[in-house]
Image: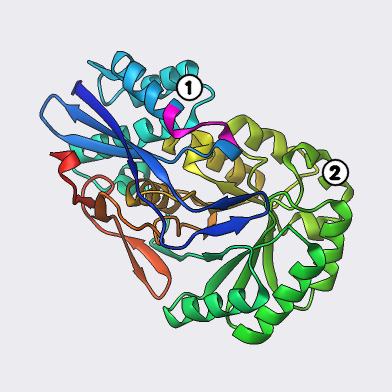
Amino acid sequence: MKIKSIRTWSENLELTRPYSIAYETIDAVENVFVEVTLGNNIKGYGSGSPAEFITGETIDSTSSILLNEANEILENKNIEDVELIFKSLTNKWPNNPAARSAVDIALYDALSKFKNLPLVDLLGRAHKSFYTSVTIGIKSIESALEEAKEYIHEGFRILKVKTGSDVSFDIELIKKLREKVGKHILIRVDANQGYDLEDLKFFFERTSNDNVEFIEQPLHSDLDSKMDELPIEIRTVCAADESLHNPEDAKRLAVEPKKYGIYNIKLMKCGGINPSLKIASTAYSSGIDLMWGCMDESIISISAALHAAMACKATKYIDLDGSFDLAKDLVSGGFKVVDGKMSLNDYPGIGFKMLSNKFN
């Protein structure tokens, strides 16, 4: 079945709760959207969330490349020749993973609808559900404790805490948070490249009794080689995020001695579902656990990431809260969240419902 037409546009989805990380304060979010129509009029939808501070993309550059070049790459291509299309996308847009991701997701949505299957079953289902973490940005201890209380009241049981601005403050925060939430709530930490080697060792030692599940991207991505200087018990509980963009990074970081025990896959970093599965394959063969993360994203791409996560045996963690604080979206559904546990529906494709006349 050939691709008949492609349409793209952008939307400001806004945020209800701005937040800070080690190097950025985020108070708004624009996403790009892609509609792929097949010859039998089946439509597939994708979305992308450019992040200049991670991949160098802006909403303008992403929108421009989609508007000016997507038709040339996709029109009249066979939807079942996805590997050839994805190879073409990577060759044409090597430095535009959010643009590639939006197209990739739309193609997978269309293909799985064409096959009349949920995407996860097209890929090969390995899991049924996971508890997601919810994120607390950098803020005062009092504000962080109040936000944690709110999330727990809503049923969430895994907190991801942004750190990296001051290691002594971070240690105090984790201790106060553990005291506040008790021993049954899981706490993860994301330093967003904010530590040096000594900070990381200090944080690990001082929080050893506070049951921190893992530490995401503690060092700057330029300092990956420094991870070799750490004992295995620290490296095992560290997750690569900004250090892991593509399947080549996954292979590089998997060389012994492995620098990280966990890979954080984000569709917007790697270019979509297709390359994410290649990263997942390397992780599985190397004994590295997978976490699936996100930016601030539409339900479309969050759902796509959840389908990919459920299809990979190495998946152990998810951090797919990127649509929870959007002020608006163009779709609903896609997944269910009950007391923090995310699961998929059984609809063909990615499984969301269109809300906006942008899709008409």
Residue depicted at 25% across the width and 44% down the height? 349
State whether residue 86 is above or below residue 227.
above
Res 34 → quadrant: top left
Question: Gap between marks 2 and 1, in whole Å?
Answer: 30 Å
Picture coordinates of residue 261 (x, y %)? 70, 52
Q: Is residue 246 visible?
A: no
SS at mark 1 in the image:
helix
The residue that disc 1 covers is: 90
State whether residue 99 is above or below residue 319.
above
**Mark 2 is on which residue type?**
Lys
The residue that disc 2 covers is: 226
Q: Are marks 2 and 1 in contact (CB under 8 Å)?
A: no
Sequence-first disc among 2 and 1: 1
Where does the magenta region start and end? Answer: 54-60
Between residues 29 and 233, which one lies in front from this camera angle? 29
Q: Residues within 10 Å of mark 2 (few under 14, many from 20)?
A: some
Residue depicted at 89% across the width and 48% down the height? 229
